[in-house]
Image (cartoon, rainbow, N blue to C red):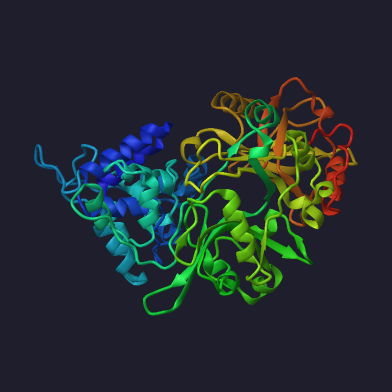
Amino acid sequence: MQAFANLLDRLSYEPRRNGKLALMEAYFRQTPDPERGFALAALTDELYFHNAKPGLIRALIGERTDPVLFALSRDYVGDLSETVALMWPAKPRPEAAPGAAGAAGGLGHNRPPDSPLLSEVIEGLTTTGKAGLAGQLADWLDHLDEVGRWALLKLITGALRVGVSARLAKTAVARLAPVPVDEVEEVWHGLAPPYEALFAWLEGRGEAPESDDPAPFRPPMLAHPIDLDELTRNEDPAAFSAEWKWDGIRIEIAAGRDKAGRHVVRLYSRSGEEIGAAFPEVCEAADFAGAVDGELLIVRGGVVQPFNVLQQRLNRRTVSAKLLRDFPPRVRLYDLLAEGEEDLRPLPFAERRARLEAFAARLPAMFDVSRTIAFASWADVAAARADPLAAGAGADAAAVEGVMLKRLDSAYVAGRPKGPWYKWKRDPFTIDAVMMYAQRGSGKRSSFYSDYTFGVWDEKGELVPVGKAYCGFTDAELKELDKFVRNNTLSRFGPVREVVHGPDKGLVLEVAFEGLQRSTRHRSGVAMRFPRISRLRWDKPPREADRLAELKRLLGTETKKARVAAPENLSFDF
């Protein structure tokens, strides 16, 4: 456990992708089975513990520290696991014999003689009942140092937050052979922790794992962002097909029959996570053999709904009858990856598209094919991107995120190869808003005020909050923002600081966002999608920030599924 904790600690402070890969590769090379396999499972979010919850952690620390002191410390630190790890009353531990290394050293760290192994922790979290888990967890925390306690608690809460995606962890494992990470992805869903067969293959001690999974995950092909200038300079429009980019989530549906003849369907997210439990009707409707790539949407009254509607069905392990009734899904197909047992990915896109249309014609109404855009030049594509309604997107025009450009002769290749596929997203909306409140971040940002609530002027001339953002700025700008908050605090509400804001005093933030939805939860009546700080407007007085009425006019144009000119004073474009 201690070696895994040291790995997480070093990953959390390593900003470079290659640096993180090097740390993980070294750990996987130096650490024996099954410890490294369980570490890989944790890094790829493949572990779930039914009885271990954050409430248990709060109860344990509440028995050992003053609750007021803990609450103040939690507000200051900004992270439950880190606060408990620092405040836990550690017990003296016997010192390790000179030169003694633990059974799971890894990264050159010795294991304290009385600390648990990662495999022991995972077995305990998996098998221990609710009644005995509190005592077991307390015993582990007593026998780990601060870093070990922090890692253990992060493991329980399921939020490692060390800047490592599942794909990056698999990339580090693939470097043991080395093999392309896509080969690891191809066999991944037939494996289970601690992945001993996977490590044996990568280290040349065994054959590649053979998966008899009838519905395996196939790593998706991704697109590079592009703009009109680059297209005009480098690409021939005659070599490409264009289609709409829809505002949902990218998914893959794989289906086939297992050895017992049972029909197996799996619904995967872009990262390979199974999400079929949240959309059982999609799996039930997928009565085919093969694999398709598409976009998952919510459709009501024949119209695709905003992304925030879809969000209400995501990340659920079960769904109620009301959710099934009120959030009907639609799968808009982009590509056909396999038909029966035939792998179509090596075929040119034009041929796969023709086969997709024939394949989709046999599917239920829940499935349709993303429409292509007719064009002769890049100027035609630019015009369609600017006005999807006029370009044939129909009633769903407001759900268009931009356009996808796919080379007609391109094979379906996992990852993001530059050249075959491009995405040209619509430009974000931007407004000038005034900072009103600030709160500390979590993890490495726990000492900075990095989460900002901002507002615009209403019809009474008062600032009304319209959103909250915690990204988009540079590290240098974060320091400027933090200094501004500390020097201009009016009052405090727990971890939140109210900062100076008025017509003549305050800080204007240029906020970029993807769209608006009506909201009954916010006093302004609107909610932004993906807001982020795009610029600090030190040059602009707060009185010149934007007005709520202008935002509501924009909301009105979106709900009517139309494109209109931007209101004066409000800077936005598609």
Quadrant where the C terminus is found in the figure: top right
Q: Residue furthest top?
A: 539
- Residue 524 visible (yes or no): yes
For residue 545, side relative to residue 83 (left or right): right
Q: Position of residue 396 (x, y in %)?
A: 77, 55
Q: Position of residue 113 (x, y in %)?
A: 15, 48
Which quadrant of the view contains residue 176?
top left
Instruction: Please name whichever residue, 231 or 510, is drawn nearer the observer in this view of the structure.
Output: 231
Question: Could you tell me which residue is drawn at 41 percent across and 43 percent down?
Answer: 168
Instruction: Please name whichever residue, 435 or 119, is drawn nearer the observer in this view of the structure.
Output: 119
Instruction: Please name whichever residue, 193 or 384, is drawn nearer the observer in this view of the structure.
Output: 384
For residue 567, side relative to residue 493 (left or right): right
For residue 571, side relative to residue 337 (left or right): right
Question: Could you tell me which residue is drawn at 42 percent across and 68 percent down?
Answer: 214
Q: Position of residue 534 (x, y in %)?
A: 67, 31
- Is 314 located above or below residue 93 in the figure? below
